[in-house]
Image (cartoon, helix red, strand yellow):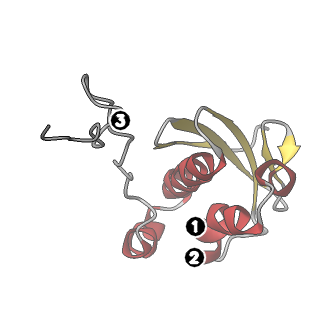
Amino acid sequence: MSEATYYGTGRRKRSIARVFMTPGKGNISVNGQPFRDYLCRETLATVVMQPLVAVEGEKSYNIKINVNGGGLTGQAGAIRLGISRALLGVNDDYRPILKEKGFLTRDARKVERKKPGQPGARKNFQFSKR
């Protein structure tokens, strides 16, 4: 008998997280490591746990996450969105709770591209009239 596996994809900035959730005891691993060891900072671990805390399911699911691209903050945001989407597969009644807290919204902000004739996206070289 196979357990149900729920899947969610999360993206933020350049990061992409694939989240696989199964009923279990609350083990969370990111790229084969415990998520607190992978993310290093407690604030990022809190960001990852937010959807589970909102639906009171911290100890209900084993979560395996593959994440790549970007930095740790973008990866944590991508994981949060992926977990939220996987929770919708578990129970559709979670939607109002997650939506109210903003966990189902994709953060569309990305780095603006550098423009030619300028040192950065918005910055210009120093102007001299003479």
- Report the mark closest to the observer, 1 or 3: 3
Q: Amino acid at mark 2?
A: Ala
The residue that label 3 is drawn on is 120
**Secondary structure state at the residue bearing disc 2:** helix
Q: Quadrant of the N terminus?
A: top right
The Cα–Cα distance between marks 2 and 3, rounded to whole angstroms, is: 40 Å
For mark 1, give the secondary structure: helix
> What residue is pinned by disc 2?
54
Tell me the kind of residue under disc 1.
Pro
Quarter of the picture holding the C terminus: top left
- What separation in Å lies between label 1 and label 3 (alpha carbons)? 36 Å
Residue at image point 81% right, 61% down: 26
- Asked where in the image residue 48 lies, by quadrant, the reply is bottom right
Q: Whole-Å distance between the Cαs marked 2 and 1? A: 5 Å
Count of labels shown? Answer: 3
Q: Mark 2: few, some, or many residues within 10 Å (few <14, many ≥20)? A: some
Mark earlier in primary sequence (2, 3)? 2
Q: Position of residue 7 (x, y in %)?
A: 58, 41
Q: In front: 63, or 75?
A: 75
- Comes first in the chain, label 1 or label 3: 1
What residue sits right under mark 1 in the picture?
51
Q: Residues within 10 Å of mark 3 (few under 14, many from 20)?
A: few
Q: Are marks 2 and 1 in contact (CB under 8 Å)?
A: yes
Image position of 119 (left or right of 5): left
Q: State the residue at coordinates (31%, 37%).
A: 121
Percent across and percent down for residue 59 are 79, 68
Is residue 36 placed above or below 110 in the rendered structure? below
